[in-house]
Amino acid sequence: MVPAFGLSELWDPSVRRDPHEFYDRVRAAGRPVLQIDPAGNRFWVVAGHADVLAGLHHPDIGHEIHRHCPVAHRPAGHDGDEVARIEARQLISLDPPDHTRLRGLVSGGFTARAVARLEPWITDLADRLVTEARRQGRLDAVTHLADPVPVNVIAELVGVPEPDRPRFRAWSAAIVSASVDARAATVEFAAYLDELAARRRAAPAEDLISDLVAREDRGDRLDRDELVALVQLLLIAGQETTVDLIVNGIRLLLGHPAQWQALRDEPALATAVVEETLRFRGPVEIVPPRYAFRDVEIAGGRIPAYDRVGLSLWGANRDPAVFARPHEFDIHRPDVRRHIAFGYGIHFCLGAHLARLEARIMFERIAQGLPGLRLADDPRDLDAFRLHQDRLPLVV
């Protein structure tokens, strides 16, 4: 029997409480499932592991739809105001050759070798956070454990002075919220970055902003909007997704006492905790908007030209064809490395090595320094699938 779907079911509050039942039905349907998103756009959901992988490197599925379709079919935002221009120039909104060019300007700072040099600095920060948490007795996982690490690490790499970092955290939260404050935050961020870039031109430092400004001045084809978009994405992606990873790892561990005990007994399991958290509840549910440049055959069906394609990482990472007992959180699972929480192909997450390092160190240090940690609220009262969870009360 073919599963039935409401046209906007994915955004129904009852479905948001556990989207995985929806993705299970999408896989069972054996075809892409049409949804209408809150903005009224046609949106085809793909949720099988093999099908999502195919979509991530399909030559006729990409971001820059305005290069492929008639004007009448183009989505808004490609020739608009400052905010629209910045959004359109972000790496996650680009295809080659611009994507290749811009990613190449920053990729060297996020290799496994480059990131490994930060381990002592991150470990020291994690130890200080754990010590302070132990002193407090009651704390919030977001504010006191998860937030400070990625916020300070990515700001250090980019070159944001320490006194300015709270402003960046506020801008990042506003932009990710997609609220009425998001546009104002983008404009304020862009103005600040213009000022910071000017300071780095006058007095270069050992940071990414100085390097990008130098490249711009040498004629490396990096314009102002591209500079703002690139740094904005690094700061937001480097903060929000890693905070989400750490908070959800803590919540899942404390909600599964046997696995929390296993980590306390063997802190080296922190690497496995990172990977299973990414698989079970990764920071990205559906990859940033992609479009079918022409009619595309995928996942047992056809997506019409110019429609949006919703490649679900959450759906792929719970596919029973790939993962045994996919709806169980299990830090000992042997198949965990097949997850695609960081995407795949040319858009594989630039900060994957950094996120893994930060989360692994935090889980190790928390297990060693806060062995009595527990949830302050009943796990059944927590919203398990909320993106960018803003609080998680804990007791030491």
Image (cartoon, grey):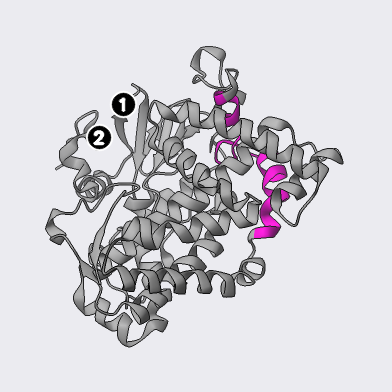
Element at badge 1?
Answer: loop
Residue drawn where x is 38% and y is 36% of the image: 177
Q: Which residue is mark 1?
A: 38
Q: Examine the rendered structure and indicate whether residue 320 appears above or below residue 91.
A: below
Residue 64: tell me if it is visible.
no
Residue 383 visible at all: yes
Q: Quadrant of the N terminus?
A: top left
Which segment did they paint magenta?
83-109
Query: What residue does disc 2 label?
Result: 11
Identity of the amino acid at label 1? Pro
Residue 190 % position (x, y): 61, 32
Where residue 292 appears, as percent x and y from the top left, is 48, 32
Q: Residues within 10 Å of mark 2 (few under 14, many from 20)?
A: some
Q: Pinpoint residue 75: horizontal percent, then vertical percent.
A: 49, 21
**Residue placed most toward the observer, 166 or 93:** 166
Sequence-earlier tag: 1 or 2: 2
Q: So how many labels did they put on this image?
A: 2
Asked if the residues shown at circle 1 and circle 2 are in contact, with their CB atoms under 8 angstroms apart, the answer is: yes
Identity of the residue drawn at 31% across and 77% down: 370
Decide which of 258, 194 is in the foreground and name it: 194
Helix, strand or loop at label 2? It is: helix
- Residue 96 included in the magenta stretch of the image: yes
Residue at image location 20% in from the left, 34% down from the top: 12
Observer-nearest of 79 and 344? 79
Report if residue 376 lies within the magenta region.
Answer: no
| Residue reaching furthest to the top | 72
| Structural crowding at the residue carrying mark 1, measured as other residues with C-alpha within 10 Å and reported as few (<14), some (14–19) or many (≥20) | few
Q: Amino acid at mark 2?
A: Trp
